[in-house]
Amino acid sequence: MAIRALAHVNIRAPEDLIEQVRRFYVDVVGLEEGPRPPFRSRGHWLYAGSLDVMHLTIDASMTGEAPVRTGWLDHYAFAATDLEETLARLTAAGVRFHVDQVPSTDQAQVFFTDPAGIAVELNFEG
């Protein structure tokens, strides 16, 4: 077996939080909502181009009072384009972020937290 790539990230939460997360990733981050197979569960699949990179699952049994812990996972990252537009969208949405430069490269990293409290990194070449 050989791993080729990360297939997707899944967020499982109560319906109201999933809707906030969906709007955030579509309206602010720039993912697009697309087709989702007819699972018994409800939710959304968000796409970067033709790839379903984020799955949002509605879990009615969750109260939203405390998130489920997933071990030591710190954050996930997306490769992205158009740094200036991204910074403008984050700023317009009132999202706090910080930008780092990767030493000895031309790569910029933008870090922020989504509405579910998950740390996200966007990587920009050039």
Image (spheres, rainbow, N blue to C red):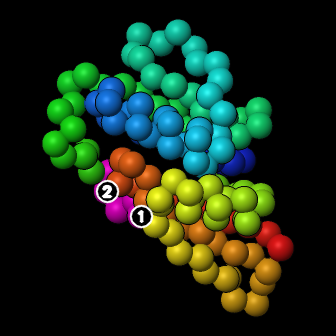
Vertical placement of 67 versus 89: above or below? above
Quarter where residue 12 is shown: top left
Which of the image's four quarters has the C terminus? bottom right
Whether residue 89 is in magenta: the answer is no
Q: Main secondary structure of the magenta part?
A: loop
Vertical placement of 38 versus 72: above or below? above
The amino acid marked with disc number 2 is Gly
Say left or right for 83 vs 62: right
Distance from disc 2 to disc 1, alpha carbons, whole Å, reads 9 Å
Nearer the camera: disc 2 or disc 1:
1
Disc 2: which residue: 71
Which range is magenta?
70-77
Q: Is residue 56 visible?
A: yes
The amino acid marked with disc number 1 is Asp
Q: Residue at x 73, y 65 (%)?
A: 83
Q: Residue at x 49, y 35 (%)?
A: 22
- Marking on residue 74: 1
